[in-house]
Structures are given as C-alpha cells and as structure tokens.
Image (tube, rainbow, N blue to C red):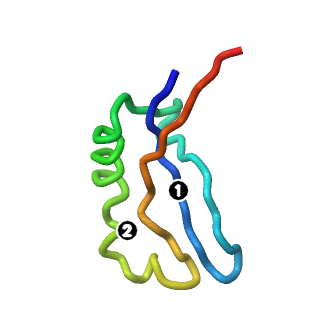
Amino acid sequence: MKAWGIEWHSHNHLDGEQRHLLWPEPCYRLFRTRQECRDYIDKHYGYIRIREDLRAEPHGWRLPRAVRVEVRVR
C-alpha cells in the first residue's frame, strides 16, 4: 500500500539534523492524498511557521513535510 505520511525534521547544533516519521494520535495515521496530509500538517503543526523562537536555536524545528510511504504487511 502506498500512502502519505508526516516527516518531522529539525536541525540544531546539539543534535544535528533529525528526521523521523510522526505517528500522531494513538494509532498510525496515513493519508490517501498528499493534499490531505498537507492540510493535516497545516492544521496541527502550522504554528511552527510563525514561531521564530521554535525555528531558532536550540530547537531548530521545521514545518513537517508530507512524504510518500510504502506499507508492507508480513
């Protein structure tokens, strides 16, 4: 199954570049379309765009990205 997921990324001097998939809510959350994923990101993480204190050191947060993921069940 191919779907869209949310990739968190940040960059700061202490930890360097960090990237991982976010799994919001109690269960895994994937989206059928890129636009659905981007709308979710804007709604739940959009505040990062206007918070310079979170984007600056020591946090180095960046707005999460919509990324294509492939899920395989074994």
Q: Is residue 74 left or right of residue 34?
A: right
Q: Quick one: SS at disc 1?
A: strand
Which residue shows up at 70% across the image and 73% down it?
15
Which residue shows up at 66% across the image and 83% down it?
13
Q: Position of residue 62 (x, y in %)?
A: 46, 68
In the depicted structure, whether residue 7 falls above or below residue 72: below
Q: Position of residue 68 (x, y in %)?
A: 48, 39
Q: Please tell me how crowded label 2 is: few (under 14), some (14-19), or many (20+) other residues with Cα within 10 Å.
A: some
* Amino acid marked by disc 2: Ile
Q: Which mark is residue 52?
A: none
| Residue designated by label 1 | 8
* Amino acid marked by disc 1: Trp
| Residue designated by label 2 | 48
State the image quarter where residue 70 is shown. top right
**Relative depth, front residue between 51 and 31:** 31
Q: In the image as oriented, which residue stretches furthest toward the top?
A: 74
Q: Please tell me how crowded label 1 is: few (under 14), some (14-19), or many (20+) other residues with Cα within 10 Å.
A: some
Please tell me which of labels 2 and 1 falls first in the chain.
Answer: 1
Which residue shows up at 59% across the image and 73% down it?
11
Q: Quick one: SS at disc 2?
A: helix
